[in-house]
Amino acid sequence: MDPKPVFLDFLNREAARAIGRERDENIDLEIIRILTVALPYRFSANISQITEYGNARPRLFSELIKLINAKVIDATSTSATLDEFIADRQARYLHVPDRYPFYFKHSDVLESVRLGSRNSFSMTDDLSRIISGYSSDQFDFELVRANPGDKPHFESSLKATVIKILNRDDLAITRDLLESNRGGATLTPQGIAATTRAISAIYMKNYAEQRGLATCTGIPDFNFREVEQYFPRYDFPLIRRLVQSLGGVPLIFAANTEEILALYGTPEHEHFGYYLGAFLESVAATVRSRANQPNDLASLRTLFHQVFIRELDGNREAQPQTLKEFYTIGQRRLLAAGERIASKDVLFGKEWRDLVPAKMTGLVAITTATDREDTALFKCLEEHGFSSSRLLRVGDGVVQEFVRGITQRIVHIRTSAGSMGVNSAGMVLPHVLQELDVKYLVSAGICFGLKPFKDGKEYQKLGDVLIATHIQDYETKRKGEKEIPRGERTSASPGILQATRIARTQTTGIGYQISEGIMLSGQMLVDDEQTVKELREAFPEAIGGEMEGNAVAGASIYKGRQWILIKGICDWGFDKKDGSQSIAAERACSLAVKAIINLLDAESP
């Protein structure tokens, strides 16, 4: 995928006259704006072409001048200065000054235009050479798609055309020249029409090739040949449709030119443009294999449309409110859709993997079990740059995806409290881990503390955060004359525990303690001082207790995933009050998100 600057060949007054088609100014503005937002590869056109086309369209011309002066459009010329350019145009159009008032009595409209790079070739000289050296086996009449019968009319008019060119006194080669009686030669109306179409097509083809530019396909009312190699990346109907699916069209219409220019060429803009191109190229790889006519662009667009409906339309979870949000959310959705299609479509996947070789970072899931834990988690995710992306259907349930940047994803799984029950962690988590291929699972939220004092001194406080190095099932036991604990003690996964310990060292200047050790887990909601006393006696090393850890550890180990449990102390297992739940949940979720970021940011050696 080799991006190229785009030739604005469709902004061409002579070409429009040649095929008898003119677009409404609003359509031209829409085309320019959508291409500017979607293609960060810059544009190019001859300054005379832009001036002669745009001057009769004042709003378009104003927009083009802003893009030229911002160097988004390279307005090329063989002239070194604007004064030199105007003098050259006045000489070339001396025979028809009324058709070009912006070069004569109204040349002040060009005062603010900044010339771009200098052409090393003269289009007028090239046209003279090509037409004078006409050879039927080297002349491509398919350049004009609307009139395949132009060849005989062109050839019958060739002698008169060459005479006019040789006698033009350095005038421009235009329809006006062909309609004149220069050299005493005349052309039939059919000859004039065929020759102007051929000259316009040669002009555009030659300029694009000389400067190494891409040309857009699918431009409305522009019936010159489309270069198939630039489909679909530079196809206007597909680009517009894709931008529409991603929620960008209303924002583009509402934005002023300065807003668009402020974001042009930013990393957000360039990333969006790259993934838009990668997505289009990958879709092309699969739809061409299904098309009855793989080279018919119109039928291919229909198949693209079906993909957009199926994979991109209807997402209302994250609608952008600004252009900057559009770039960020748009590239995220393109990446998500690309990864999703690549997993089930071989042809799409092959092209996608070539263009996006690094898969999205291993998926991390974080689970909570109460409303306060949800509120705390969402706040922490937002503070660290994650935003809600979409809802994912997993079996009969739904989970929520949060993303940051291009490759970092977190899936939030909400369960009911405890490890047992239809909606509990024990029932929900195994399905999610399996279907989403989660690599890491983090349980974050609240717990009760077991060591408010140690060795006669205050040890734990409400709001302290506990990291489980092990989960101990405290409810499974042998009941007889003497109770004997039989519950499993499961070690936290080493990789994610290391990331959490690093996050602990990164959490400085805080007014609470972060400690690690054995956490008790059971189905019972502990709210009894005697029960807490019994737990301390049975498990003297334990630092806290909660209700979901058994399921988190069990589901992760069974599915071969890594897990960790991070909880904040909200009470001591009796005389429960709600006052410390929010702060405990926020602190635990903050550490959990930092640990996840360490996992996502870690690089391969």
Image (tube, rainbow, N blue to C red):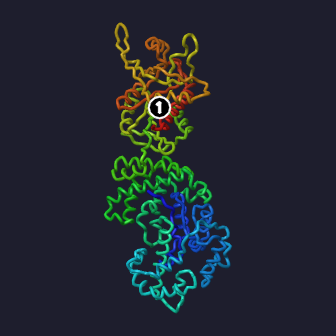
Helix, strand or loop status at disc 1: strand
Towards the viewer: 54 or 114: 114
Q: Residue furthest bottom?
A: 184
Q: Quadrant of the C terminus?
A: top left
Question: In the shown orientation, is residue 330 left or right of residue 151?
Answer: right
The residue carrying mark 1 is 368
| Residue 84 picture quarter | bottom right
Given the current orientation, which residue lies at the most extreme top position? Answer: 481
Identify which residue, 604 or 553, lies in the foreground.
Answer: 604
Q: Amino acid at mark 1?
A: Thr
Q: What is the crowding at mark 1: few (fewer than 14 residues within 10 Å), some, or many (at least 20)?
A: many
In this picture, is 397 found above or below 217? above
Q: Residue at x 52, y 53 (%)?
A: 270
Q: Is residue 278 above or below residue 427?
A: below
Q: The N terminus appears in which quarter of the rendering?
A: bottom left
- How far from the left and from the top, in percent, is residue 407? 47, 43
- Residue 258 in picture, x, y percent from top left: 62, 58
Count of numbered badges drawn on the protein: 1
Q: Is residue 547 left or right of residue 320?
A: left
Considering only vertical position in the picture, is 214 above or below 449?
below
Q: Is residue 305 left or right of residue 251?
A: left
x%, y% of residue 399?
A: 43, 39
